[in-house]
Amino acid sequence: MDKSVDLQHYYLELSPEPVRFDAVSQLTNVFFDDAKQQVFAVRSGGATGIVVKSATDGQNISFCMEDRGTIRSIKFSADNQVLAVQRNDTSVEFVPFNANNQPNVPEMLTHQGKNIIYGFVWVQERQVALISKAGVEIFQLNFEKRTLKSVKSLNITVNWFSFCPTSNFALLSSNMGTILTPVILKASTITKLPRLELGTSQGCSGRDVTLAQLYGTNAIMILRQLQNRQFEVVIYLLNGPGLAPKKSHILRLGQSGRFAMNIVDDVVVVHHQASATSMLFDIALGGAETEVGSGAVIHQPIIPAKTIKPYTLEVPSMSLDGKTINCDLYSQHWVLFQPNIVIDAKLGCLWHVLLKLNSLCALITDRFRLVEFLLQRTEGKPVLLNVLKEMMSVNYSGTMLPVIESIFNKLNCLYKSVLDNELQSQMALMALSTKSQSSKLSPVPRVIVDQSDAYTGVFSSITDTEQLGKILLLYLHSLARNGITANPELSKQIVIDLVRNKQFDTLHQLLKYSALNESKPLACFLLSLSNSDPSISQMALDMLARLNANEIILEVLLEKGQVVEALRIAKQMPGADSLPARKYLEAAYKTKDPLVFHSVYNFFQAKNVRLRGSPDFLKHEQCTEYVQYYQTLISTQCL
């Protein structure tokens, strides 16, 4: 398939190197621990052979255990030194492992409960939380003392539960899914948060609920069917301790059937099995409307639903050529886990779902909305800079100026927030001795385009664009509008590019409106480029005048032989009576213009008469040779 077509057609893909494991069969069961992202392939027989593969670090563990019955759930502790196994409704086994990653079954501890145990999660290397029909209880494992000690419990009737390993929060369902209670599970601690009451007509089952983190905030996402049989996802955010989950966002799916969700770089990906397509939602993008009553923002898919990029899987073969098969996407054998994991137990593959940002750039035609989207993506900066470069390249249209201006303001507003945060951080460090800090730092945006990024990633590559001057003015004015001083290095690089490309009118325009960071070094740098065009020298002098850098102006004028103009300026400066006569006479002499020398000589003679009553120069002024030169001019009647 042509690469360009491919890029435009698919905006989701599966990771190129899946984790491979033994597929489900009559003898093999597969389990997945989403907390440690480990796949357990459990092969039954005379003994139970177990192969554990990690989706994060590539570590594999293989061992055998006595077949003690069908396994329902299996998970390692954080250090892989204790294996928890549930085989029936009321008990869980805890098997320690030795230094060779092999089970020490004789040292096994068993918890035997009275209530149905729905599942368990590790909260520490030797602490595990059991969720049962009667609530949540955390146990401390001590293999030396052969004890399982209860260290914390919460009594609450539970129908089912869901768990988010990213932030260790569980959702406990009561009253047939109409009351949902979030709890935070940590070492020896169970923190019960305000519950979410859905109402008798809105109860949900565990398969309709997905827990995740969106932009660092815990989220409860509930799949709900509307009266027209279409579905939507209602997102409740847990904005802080003591605050009840708030109905904040609604994702309109516009279809019916079976759905499943992933979170890919904070983008909610909703997979629809019937159409074999996926929809993208970003709650950071403003919605078109809000729901009456709740104020929840209603979101439509960012772009029309598309299928995941087709995937070809290599299969074992005795031939050198190998064999490949086309994977059945959106298969009924797919099981999804958060944040972005897809498991096909029949094929024996675990993939990560990935965003193809370059493809999205071709599909999202609203450039401002695209920029907003890319600003929230972890790898968004290089793609964003390419988008900006394309917008301002040779294909640029003047009608894009308002859009470019809005984008600059968006980028620089975020840039300013980072600068303010840095300033607040410095002030906070200075005030550490105080009892409390009055200011709270804002979260740092994910992608920041500073002045260096704008120059190296965009402006330096579009110097042949006719509208460069307008674009630079928009950017520099945007900096000023957001209270940001143009970077001296950025100003210097802009000057270099404009002079190299002979865009002197653009340079003059930028200097006229003081858009660049004017400074004495920049003015002197301009002077060093004055050979490129006579107008540059005047631009530099004008800048120095605005900076009141009269001393430098005098030096420049003397160097250029404009001695009379230098004297005119010097007379208006403080200390005009102490001007060094030799310096100005020498500059006048170098012009080889007798009239210029005569004018300067007469100026200093008049000053001497006014200050000392005599036109003569003092000995320490070292003007003897210029006095002789003046007399020669007079005697030869050159004046």
Image (tube, grey):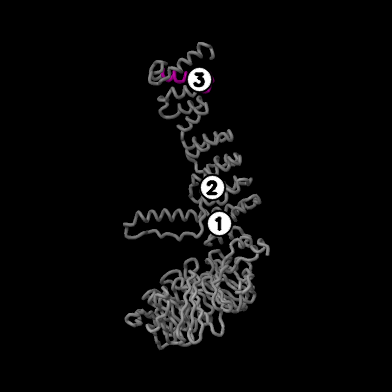
Q: Is residue 546 left or right of residue 459?
A: left
Q: Secondary structure at mark 2?
A: helix
Image position, residue 48 (x, y; %): 48, 84
Q: Are marks 1 and 3 in contact (CB under 8 Å)?
A: no
**Above or below — where is 525 with respect to 69?**
above
Give the image quarter of residue 318: bottom right
Q: Is residue 507 above or below residue 135?
A: above
Is residue 161 on the magenta stretch?
A: no
In magenta, the rendered stretch is 590-609
**Which residue position holds label 3?**
597
SS at badge 1: helix
Amino acid type at mark 1:
Pro
How far is mark 1 from mark 2, CA to CA?
21 Å
The residue beneath circle 1 is 382
Name the residue at 55% across, 53% down.
408
> What kind of residue is marked 3?
Phe
First in sequence, mark 1 or 3: give its number: 1
- Where is residue 528 shown, x and y percent of the image? 52, 35
Q: 296 or 164, which is in the foreground?
A: 164
Precedes in sequence: disc 3 or disc 2: 2
Q: Which residue occupies the foreground of this view, 35 or 264?
A: 35
Residue 357: x percent and y percent? 58, 62
What is the crowding at mark 1: few (fewer than 14 residues within 10 Å), some, or many (at least 20)? few
x 46%, y 55%: residue = 418
Q: CA distance from mark 3 to mark 2?
A: 45 Å
- Disc ID at residue 476: 2
